[in-house]
Amino acid sequence: MAQSAARDALYSRVLQRYPDCPELPALPASSVKWSEADFGLFIESMGLIAPAGQDVCDVDVEEATPTYAAGESHSQNVHIKGMSSAEACLVIPSQIYMEDLSPAGLNIESILTKFDRCRAAALQTICATNLREMADGFGVGILLSDLCLLIESPAPPALISAATVESEIDLPRLPLVPSWQRLVDSSGGVACSATFGQLLVDLKTTRLSTNQEAYKQLKMPCDRIFGRDIPNKVTLAVRGALAEKLGKQHPSQGRLFTPNAFYKGRYVVAPSDCDTYNTLYHPKVPSVCEHACLSTGQKFCLGSATAFFSRFLAPLPPGLALRVHMFVETRADRGARCMYIFEEEHKLGSCALCAFAVYGGPVPGVLYNEEVEACSQKSAQWLLKIEQTLTSGGKCDSAAGWDISQVHAQNGDHRPGFTENVIEKMLAA
């Protein structure tokens, strides 16, 4: 009763700001948890939008976080770390299983899957909503544009050992929804870290969203639960630190990416590679790159992956046949550094996905700014145009963020299974 009375009083106070407001639908049961801004959103939408709601008092993050967040039941408490700071994060307990480890270290696909579960849990806990509610209530979704993962420790966490996943979310300005995550071992050391470029998109138009109310629905509870909602000097300093973190670039190596070998492989997207959105599930990308490498007969991907970057440019549905162009720079002190360009087999010059992987490199893993800048749609399309020059043994000058003056095409795997239309040609003969 007390909650209902407080709700009615707050609703009445907000409603007074809208003297010409027509009769609205009855308030839903969840409105007892609404804030003043939530009531404003309900009224302005003429009752069409019912915010998910979150208590204005401290949220019990352990109770609010799904127990399946990291793929197993919690053995420790879910909690907020670094309250009222630029490093504020939701800490979710996890554990290291067989699937999380590979012969060479961490299994990046498995770790990215663990991170994805925890990001979904963080969205539900911190922002009091989920992707389905955002789609149904506002017609928006969160699109992953790029990801970067770096191995931070030379030794992975031990098998069947406790670990935690730390998840940060920030909403600096529409349409950005960046996220940072870390896998922390039982001794408190960071095993690996990842950043995710996420964008709010309009599901109907598939364009970047301009829906301020939807963005506010995410931002307000996020700021509140991380203790940065009250405008004061501390909050302003935190905002400055978050802006600096968002704008932080990878270190520069002082020269362009300079590969010395070129290989061409092939990959067909399998149904098991894809998610419910009928496209390649992003944790699968490192494994797809490994298969593409091995399709050429090369084995540089067998080294421990110390850094990985991927930029998503187009949908990759099941059955899509891809040509994979690999540009590799190999140096003893930096491992094999490979740029992957995925081109649709029957759509010449298209680029659906770009990725950059470092195998056998130094730890902590590092990606250079020049390498990330080279991993772009513009650079990829430029390289696809000059592929004929490369495969015929010629050389090309530097352009589009690359120095390919040292590249010589290498023979890939020319077995019938990997040669386009070879069976048809044999039958025709």
Image (spheres, helix red, strand yellow):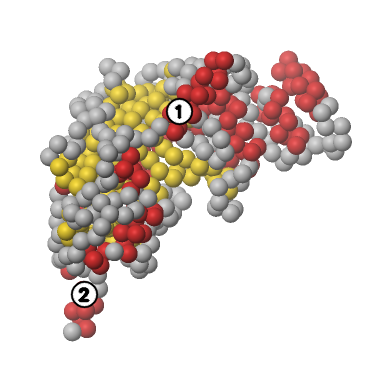
Residue type marked 2: Ile
Toward the bottom, the furthest residue is 429
- Spot the residue most to the left: 332
Quarter the N terminus occupies: top right
Q: Does residue 25 appear left or right of residue 105 in this picture?
A: right
Residue at the image position 29 percent from the left and 64 percent from the top = 386
Nearer the observer, 145 or 123: 145
Say few, some or many: other residues with alpha carbon within 10 Å of mark 1 (under 14 / 14 to 19 / 20 or more). Answer: few
Q: Which quadrant would residue 372 be assigned to in this image?
A: top left
Q: Nearer the viewer, mark 1 or mark 2?
A: 1
Compare residues 397 and 390 and report the one nearer the observer.
397
Work out how far the residue at label 1 is from the one at label 2, CA to CA, in angstroms. Answer: 55 Å
The picture places residue 403, in percent across and down from the top left corner, at 25, 51
Percent x, y for residue 205? 58, 54
Q: Which residue is mark 1?
A: 244
What element does badge 1 sit on? helix
* Quadrant in the picture for residue 51: top right
Front residue of this view, candidates 178 and 20: 178
Q: Is residue 159 visible?
A: no
Q: Quadrant of residue 230?
A: top right
Let me know if residue 407 appears in the view: yes
Name the mark on residue 163: none
- Tell me where residue 70 appears, x and y as whole percent: 38, 30
Compared to 419, does 425 lie above or below? below
**Residue, x 87% and y 32% (percent of image)?**
19
At numbered mark 2, what does the secondary structure look like: helix, strand or loop? helix
Residue at label 2? 423
- The amino acid type of the residue labelled 1 equals Glu
Give the residue drawn at x 65%, y 37%: 213
Which circle's residue, 1 or 2, is located before the other in the chain?
A: 1
Identify whether 184 is placed above or below 215.
Answer: above
